[in-house]
């Protein structure tokens, strides 16, 4: 047996031992709402994620039903007797603590992080501020508002730099700025989606992502994935619809680098008090392999191109079993996950 296979087997066993055990009786889950669609700019992706999750749960005999908060009031969840919710919503009003707060009030256990962790992770500026208090590495940044001078940004952050709306995901509204003349246009694009704009140092290197299962001290990283997008542009199209993007899982990295990337990914997840599952995006700087944290996704994609299912497969966990494991972790999050 190769060392890579042995490592994957050991990781799978460790995760299985630390995570809630999935009941073999689908009835134990009760009536399950799969929340997808929603109001955000990521509605289309959420519909793809939720459809996959719904089919997976039903294939295992779970009494799962589609529920779109854009079309139905959240109060209908309790009225219709739902026992728990699988959140497959992405972006605002689904991944930012809003739906989580509604489910807490309704008393319906749900998958993923709680209200505070979801809100923090959705706000890339607040995420960075928390990470900095923990001494975790993240690219240098500034917060820019309408009326602020943009001319000096490249002088302080260097070129190229990244501009993005801090409350969106799926690369929506993001630009890579290569020259002074591009700063204003990039700001205006990001400002279409948010009240403030995050200007961030560009890290030249390899793009990595780390899926995480569990909560608090039981949180564990799955194999690291390296993303190789056409032209280095991992945009909305290349994320969800292109077959040209390459994914290397496990990422071909030295063992020490892999261990460090997984360590800071788990620490960044714990720092925000995330729970259940998530995915941490990391840049590995060219030349010295220094890792830099970009963001945490508390409700990652579950589409045919998505990365958490890919990492799970690398340790022998099928899409269906992954969905069951996530569903089994559904809970009310009244207290911290530490």
Image: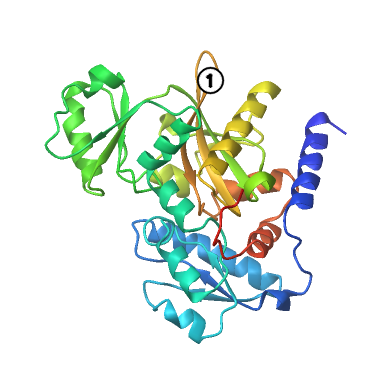
Q: Quadrant of residue 102?
A: bottom left
Q: Is residue 172 visible?
A: yes
Task: Compare residues 319 and 231 and report the one nearer the observer.
Answer: 319
| Furthest-right residue in this view | 1
Task: Compare residues 145 and 302 and report the one nearer the observer.
Answer: 145
Could you tell me which residue is drawn at 51 percent across and 51 percent down? Answer: 298
Q: Seen in the image, is 215 located left or right of residue 103? A: right
Q: Seen in the image, is 137 located left or right of residue 275? A: left
Element marked by disc 1? loop
The N terminus: image quadrant = top right
| Furthest-left residue in this view | 147
Q: Percent x, y for residue 291?
A: 53, 25
Could you tell me which residue is drawn at 42 percent across and 40 percent down? Answer: 127
Could you tell me which residue is drawn at 44 percent across and 47 percent down? Answer: 121
Q: How many labels sit on residues?
A: 1
Q: Percent x, y for residue 123?
A: 37, 46
Q: Percent x, y for residue 337?
A: 60, 52
Q: Which residue is mark 1?
A: 290
Q: Seen in the image, is 1 located left or right of residue 185? A: right
Q: Quadrant of residue 150?
A: top left
The vertical placement of 35 against 128, above or below, is: below
Could you tell me which residue is drawn at 73 percent across and 52 percent down? Answer: 317
The vertical placement of 325 against 292, above or below, is: below
Q: Percent x, y for residue 204?
A: 43, 21
10 Å crowding of disc 1: few (<14), some (14-19), many (20+): some
């Amino acid at each position: 047996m190769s060392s890579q296979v042995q490592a994957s087997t050991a990781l799978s066993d460790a995760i299985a031992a630390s995570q809630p055990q999935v009941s073999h009786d689908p009835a134990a889950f009760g009536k399950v709402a799969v929340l997808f669609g929603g109001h955000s700019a990521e509605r289309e992706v959420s519909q793809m994620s939720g459809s996959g999750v719904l089919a997976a749960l039903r294939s295992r005999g779970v009494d799962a039903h589609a529920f779109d908060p854009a079309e139905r009031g959240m109060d209908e969840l309790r009225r219709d007797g739902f026992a728990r919710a699988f959140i497959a919503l992405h972006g605002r009003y689904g991944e930012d603590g809003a739906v989580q707060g509604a489910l807490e009030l309704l008393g319906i256990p749900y998958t993923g992080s709680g209200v505070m962790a979801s809100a923090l992770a959705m706000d890339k500026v607040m995420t960075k501020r928390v990470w900095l208090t923990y001494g975790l590495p993240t690219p240098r940044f500034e917060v820019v508002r309408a009326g602020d001078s943009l001319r000096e940004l490249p002088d302080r952050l260097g070129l190229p730099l990244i501009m993005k709306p801090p409350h969106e995901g799926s690369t929506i509204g993001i630009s890579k700025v290569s020259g002074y003349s591009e700063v204003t246009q990039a700001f205006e694009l990001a400002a279409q989606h948010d009240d403030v704009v995050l200007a961030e140092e560009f890290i030249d290197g390899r793009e990595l992502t780390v899926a995480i299962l569990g909560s608090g001290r039981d949180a564990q990283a799955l194999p690291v994935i390296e993303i190789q997008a056409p032209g280095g542009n991992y945009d909305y199209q290349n994320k969800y619809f292109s077959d040209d993007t390459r994914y290397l899982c496990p990422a071909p990295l030295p063992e020490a680098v892999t261990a460090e990337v997984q360590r800071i990914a788990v620490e960044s997840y714990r720092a925000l008090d995330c729970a259940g599952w998530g995915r941490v995006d990391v840049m590995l700087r060219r030349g010295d392999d220094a890792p830099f944290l970009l963001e945490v996704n508390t409700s990652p994609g579950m589409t045919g191109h998505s990365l958490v299912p890919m990492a799970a497969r690398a340790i022998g966990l099928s899409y269906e079993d992954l969905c069951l494991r996530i569903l089994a972790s559904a809970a009310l999050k009244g207290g911290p996950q530490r």
